[in-house]
Amino acid sequence: MVHILTILIVCAAGYLIVKKYQTQTVIFAAGLLLLTIAAFQGNDFVSMAKSKSTGWVVFDIFDMIRVIISGRVGKLGLIIMAAGGFAKYMGHIGAARAMVDLTVKPLSKLRSPYVVIALAYLLGQVLNIFIPSASGLAMLLLISMFPILIRLGATPASSAAVIATTACLDLGPASGNSLLGARTSGMDASTYFVSEQLMLAVPAMIVIAVLHFFVQRYFDKRALESSDVSEKLEEFRSKQESARKVPALYAILPTLPLILLLVFSKFVVASIKLNVVTAMFISLIVAVFFELVYTRKAKEVMADVKVFFIGMGDTLAGIVTLIFAAEVFALGLKAVGFIDMLLSSAHGVGLPAIGLLIVIVLIIGITALMTGSGNAAFFSFANLAPDAAAAFGLKAVVFVLPMQLVAGLFRSFSPVAGVVLACAGTADVSPFEVVKRTFIPMAGGVIVVVIGSWFML
């Protein structure tokens, strides 16, 4: 009975999110409701959260919010906030634009729009390592890459589809999903990226790029040409001309945190360990120095540093609070015994490790499709991985990595995902027209990730 009620609560939460109720509030409420059920069962969820009781179970339910926030805000929360602030500052000073412009420019020399589409995906996925926001990267590429693809002969829908998927794998130490994946796996961010992510991501990227080539060419042959392409291109050109121009050297600034983290790790300089947040602040100071030298306006440059902290606040209000809500929800699922039920059911029917992994992948995928958020999907179920892996005597990363990667893949063909909506709006097409073109490449990526994970078992 309790498990049926749990499923109803999960379905109700998904329904409300699809209906555009505030995501964090819905997930918080669902988590608190599950904890209330656990309290009626007499389950000790306080011990599960490694905390102490307030003395009254009603207060204990709400105290779990405090326990989870206090345990996360100074660690994972701070890392994600620093990454968000740095990304916002890079956009503000024009460094992110400089990097995109520098890397996109060679693509315009190729004549086939579908070769360019395949390469554009690969380029965008690499840029995502340095610009971890899916929507932020998409907006930059919509300004710079979209007109090039249109000019070479691709339709607006195809151009929007490839740009919407450029961050589908959430790669690199600056990604919120990657950071949580590394932490859940018991690894530092650099090791997780180099030793684990790239092993599955590279073959997935190749398959996705090839599928983009054939899928977009197929749909473009059947699609009617947009009548207002020239008007849209003129609009993009005017925006580019009015944007702030900075030296090409600025393009290196968004890469500094990753460079620092990779250099000062066991792969290069093992004697020095550098924290992600520290790398972000070092890179911020270097960027400020660039600005001082370039503009020679110390007062304005120092005032602009506030953009970094505004970005941290925006990230706290968005992604980090989503982490808090998801952890309350995950604790609720664990407290009512739902997670143990899934694991015992898998063992009860003799489900092998790959079978359980596929079930969890499907759960994450459905959540990402309903919410349009890879973060919400992965954050809600990441805590399943260590227990699931331990049940089969495996390392946590064997489950964590495919869970993290498929969350972004499923998000990229969700018609309610912010990045899909932004790209569809720019192309002046329906979001369903975009996801129709992203479904096959993303499905190919999911298959590669699952098969690759099978070999890791």
Image (cartoon, rainbow, N blue to C red):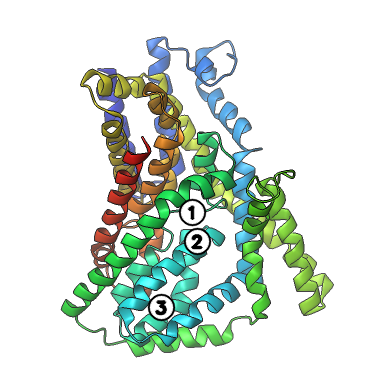
Specify the amino acid type for callout 1: Leu
Q: Nearer the viewer, residue 411 or 251?
A: 251
Secondary structure beneath dot 2 equals helix
Q: Nearer the viewer, residue 254 or 58?
A: 254
For discs 3 and 1, the disc positioned in front in the rendered view: 1
Gap in angstroms between the C-alphas marked 3 and 1: 22 Å
- 10 Å crowding of disc 3: few (<14), some (14-19), many (20+): many
- 10 Å crowding of disc 1: few (<14), some (14-19), many (20+): many
Specify the amino acid type for callout 2: Asn
Specify the amino acid type for callout 3: Phe
Check the image and report above or below for 394 versus 278.
Answer: above
Q: Nearer the viewer, residue 293 or 38?
A: 293
Based on the displayed image, in which of its 4 quarters is residue 51 positioned?
top right
Query: Label 1, on which residue?
Result: 171
Secondary structure beneath dot 1 equals loop
Q: Nearer the viewer, residue 356 or 146?
A: 356
Q: Which mark is residue 128?
A: 2
Task: Tell whether label 2 touches label 1 (CB within 8 Å).
Answer: yes
Q: Residue at x 36, y 19 (%)?
A: 337
Q: Residue at x 37, y 77 (%)?
A: 116
**Sequence order check: which comes first, mark 1 or mark 2?**
2
Q: Is residue 120 left or right of residue 221?
A: right
Residue 229: where, in percent of width, then height?
33, 86
Can I make out residue 428 in this image? Answer: no
Q: Is residue 391 left or right of residue 188?
A: left
Check the image and report above or below for 401 versus 291.
Answer: above
Q: Which mark is residue 146?
A: 3
Gap in angstroms between the C-alphas marked 1 and 2: 7 Å
For discs 2 and 3, the disc positioned in front in the rendered view: 2
Residue 355: where, in percent of width, then height?
26, 33
Based on the displayed image, in which of its 4 quarters is residue 38 positioned?
top left
**Sequence order check: which comes first, mark 3 or mark 1?**
3
